[in-house]
Amino acid sequence: MSMIRFSKDHEWIRVEDGKGVIGITDYAQAQLGDVVFVELPEMGATLMKGDEAAVVESVKAASELYAPVSGEVSALNQALVDDPALANSQPMDDGWFFEITLNDLTELDELLDDEAYEAYLAELG
Amino acid sequence: MPMNRTGRPSHSGEGTLPAPFESFSGHRGLRHEEPLIFEIGDARHSGVDIEDAGDFQTALGGLERNGSIGLPGLSEPQTVRHFTRLSQKNYGIDSGFFPLGSCTMKHNPRLNEKVARLPGLADIHPLQPQSTVQGALAVMRDLSHWLMTLTGMPAVALNPKAGAHGELCGIMAIRAALEARGDARKIILVPESAHGTNPATAVFCGYQVKAIPAGPDGRVDLEALKKALGPDVAGIMLTNPNTCGLFERDIIKIAEAVHEAGGFFYCDGANFNAIVGRVRPGDLGIDAMHINLHKTFSTPHGGGGPGSGPVVFSEALAPYAPLPYVVETDDGLALHEHHQGADDQSFGRLVAFHGQMGMYVRALAYMLSHGHDGLRQLAEDAVLNANYLLAELSTHITASFTGPCMHEALFDDRFLKDTGISTLDFAKAMIDEGYHPMTMYFPLVVHGAMLIEPTESESKATLDEFIASMRGLAAAAKEAAETGKTERFTAAPHFAPLRRLDETLAARQPLLKWTAPTPSQAAE
Amino acid sequence: MRYLPHNDRDRQAMLKAIGVASIDDLFADVPKAARLSSPLDLPSHKSELEVDRLFRDYARRNIPAAEHAFFVGCGAYRHHIPASVDYIIQRGEFLTAYTPYQPEIAQGTLQYLFEFQTQIANLLGCDVANASLYDGSTACGEAILMARRITRGRKKAILAGGLHAHYGDVVETITQYGDEQVIRLQPLADDPARDLQNLIDSIDEETACVVVQTPDLFGHLHDLGPLAEAAHAKGALLVAVVTEVVSLGAVKSPGEMGADIVVAEGQSIGNGLNFGGPYLGLFATREKYVRQMPGRLAGQTRDADGKRGFVLTLSTREQHIRREKATSNICTNSGLCALAFTVHMTLLGEKGLRQLAMINHKKATQLRAALAGIDGVEVLNQSYFNELCVRLPGRADALVEALAGQKILAGVPASRLYPQRPELANILILAITETVSEADIALLAGALRDYLATPGIKER
């Protein structure tokens, strides 16, 4: 049974069996505009929550994707590197960035659930 | 992910206007299609006559270059035509009004070009014996004198090669001064409205950047600044007049507060044009300031360089200025090129030689032409022109702040609200009107910024034409929103050599050099 | 004032429209204490004729290269520039344009930058080149910072002894406040092989890059192959520097020899001596490093009608977007100098460049022969392109001063660049290009012979 959580930095993480797949939200991709380049972390890298994990660039902006939880990078989405437009067209599925093997599942409690993230977006206007 | 967004859309325009017909040549009258030199030249042709060296015993250490290099040649007439046609696809100050905010696109006098080409000034080598270049050293000395007098500062480093390079020079001097007194401060304060080069420079010199918010009047919030100051603050980088086109009213108090906290005050002098001859930065408490010779002193922008960014220094920073610099000796002028002894505190060398001599000559010619009276008058006219545009345009286009402004006026996109037309669309429509658009989406402190800097070079008639055109566009935008026919804007430009370009494609599949087509491509 | 269009009537009308009484009202935000009340102590305005005279006077106090037998090089070279180059760069559409931020009305600039980038990449033997930097020395500094980014965490840069002294100084200056570690090897005028070996021996696991110049400061040519191999074996990058790009019409490019980043001073093509600036920094590298590259880049794309066009691209590396995270603080290139380069290179073409390079080299062999025949002069080069160094029996700077009085600029004394190295005091570096005649060589050789025959010279 998978669960999905969001960060206030507009990242999502879908967790199943202690592994979390991470990407950027639809809101984030819309704000960035056409994504032209993505740089992913190294396979096997250890990330602490809040570390700079990936870079996403559009024509007009460059942003870092911070690790929403701590853990070890256990998979990378090479298809996204080859076709960064996936981050725009399918941000929540084929446009995923990388997978992390979580150290501490309780870190997820600090993130937002679906409803809370929606409310947060509404606040941003 | 924090989004450092500028709000600038990047899509290419939609919609089109039909051409009457296609010409057989692909050209349209004076508007020529021009291929790349790689498509019209080849390795066998040349536009120079150089004798063949013939057979001789070479000494190239067995490193002869044998294979093809990939450099096509053209005869002289073909070369001249190629580059002339390219030039005709460009907009320069000579072509028309170029109100690009923060860039000071003023007239470039041709006298300056002429004197910079005198063989006695152009055909001299930086490492010739100094006895053979006394005139060149005198140009550097006299330019220094003008810059120090105009700014009221006791020292100047001429060598930085651009404004951003000047910033680097200034912040390095600050760091050197702090280190000399054993003071390892870590933070540079930078207002939100600053040029992007300011924070980049501070980080380059090993500092952390702390942003200072702007107050509602578009100026630095003095109280917020005072709160941010402390024993860890090395200094502040402040643009004055600032990038909203406003004079920082509290600047003297800012300088006092920074000095009291033991820091230094770096001023970004990009906008010196507004105050030259009327205000001396030295009287404002500044420790270092770069001056863009390519802005205030009219050396040509040249499509993006070469620039020149001398930095003036206060007494406190003067000892740390970079090498080399001109000194007076018993034998005439000399270049101080190397550290001499332990008490020589210069932070070192920034460029291979002495800086942008070609720009020094042009800038000095400009200063001598104007004199102190003409420089003061040009600042006044630049400010007058900007305020005239602010007054005449703010009836139709939303001004971000009330006047008076200095040399540039800031507008934003509130007047386009609900029209479906963005600042970018509006700017592209200005191209169809025959203008170079203003600076857009900068500064970041207002939404959809439009920063208009007319400079003193423009006549009232030019400004009146521009005002009429801008008012017309603003009215057309409102009307377009009502009828839903926004193509005039969203598909603009219609009359430029090219339509809107796809920046996304360029960035996703970077094609940064020409490569020969494969046989299958060639067959297409 | 001839550059200001307004008359007082215009000014009054505009003040009225603004709604203020006087120009002073527009400067109301300036603190009273900072308003200048009296005129500055500077001269008042001058006519075009007067200014023209003043500059002729400045110019008269210099001795231009054309009036000498001229052998000065060391990073700036006097070549003949075809007349049409200066004509093109003075066209107002190029001269008075800004950075091409509005590509629809800046295709002229963007297309020549694309042509320039292609010429540079091919000339230096690399995949990609940028749209230029300030000059060769700052490009060298940027290359070291880039190598640092690529090799993540490695801090050490090792500079060959044959790297131009000023380039080494610039590198030291700009890295002094970072945590980079810069190691400068000893300059060896007479032993280029040892210089290269020292470089190879210095490479370790901490090394981000090694920096080598060819032809080097003393004119020696280097085969970079073994150095590239040694650097790569330890995971370091090879940065190659070229200060005389005409050499690349005769000598293998650094890219072909395995360099990862190649920087150069491009002044030799299209740009005059100008007493040291403005010059033209060239920067090229491998495709895989392009996002780590500093400076502007023009790229090809299409417009809304599908027509080919060019834009500035990959600008997310730059400071107007990344601000404090930019790859560099550089914001300009040397646009007009790049145009001069591209026009001159188009006129030359591959054929002209090769001919030019071989004429330069041939002249250098003639110079070498003339110098080698002079008693007391020891030529230190086995390999060279158009620059040589010699060891004299006495100080080289004294010789240069003495010959300047005879309308001969004999070269650069190594002490001008290394005043604190007594072992280089007698070293003279001489460059020769197509602009130097055989008569000039004979003049130099004669004067040198006479000078050295003067009693007491060798003891100075």
Image (tube, coloured by chain):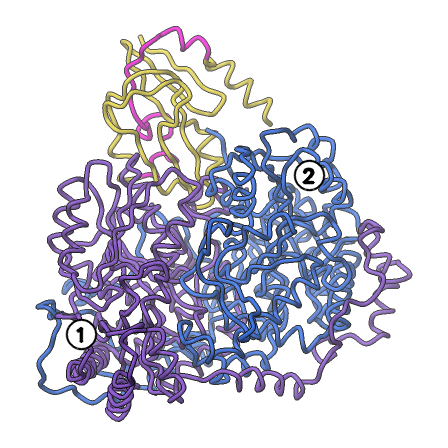
Chain colours: A yellow, B blue, C purple
Residue C386: horizontal and vertical position, in percent?
Answer: 23, 76
> Looking at the figure, which quarter contains the C terminus of chain C?
bottom left
Whether residue B485 is visible: no
Residue C285: horizontal and vertical position, in percent?
Answer: 26, 54
Q: Viewed as shown, does residue B278 lie left or right of C154?
A: right
Chain of the residue that carries numbered disc 2 in the rendered image: B
Image position of B322 with respect to B219: above or below: below
Query: Mark 2 = which residue?
Result: B259
Q: Is residue B75 magenta?
A: no
Q: Is residue A105 magenta?
A: yes
Query: Mark 1 = which residue?
Result: C379
Label 2: element kind: helix
User: Looking at the image, which residue sits at the far right?
Assistant: C21
Residue at mark 1 to residue at mark 2: CA–CA distance: 58 Å
Q: Viewed as shown, does residue C312 lie left or right of B93?
A: left
Disc 2 residue type (three-letter): His
Label 1: element kind: strand
Alpha-carbon neighbours of circle 2 within 10 Å: few (<14), some, or many (≥20)?
some
Residue C440: horizontal and vertical position, in percent?
Answer: 28, 90
Q: Viewed as shown, does residue C155 lie left or right of B175?
A: left
Image position of B216 with respect to C126: above or below: above
Residue ID at (15%, 66%):
C252
Image position of C234 with respect to C28: above or below: above
Choose between C282 and C182: the one closer to the eye: C182
Choose between B249 and B424: the one closer to the eye: B249
Instruction: Tell me which segment is drawn in magenta.
Output: A84-110
Residue C390: horizontal and vertical position, in percent?
Answer: 22, 73
Choose between C346 and B291: the one closer to the eye: B291
Tell us which disc is closer to us: 1 or 2.
1
Whether residue C293 is visible: yes
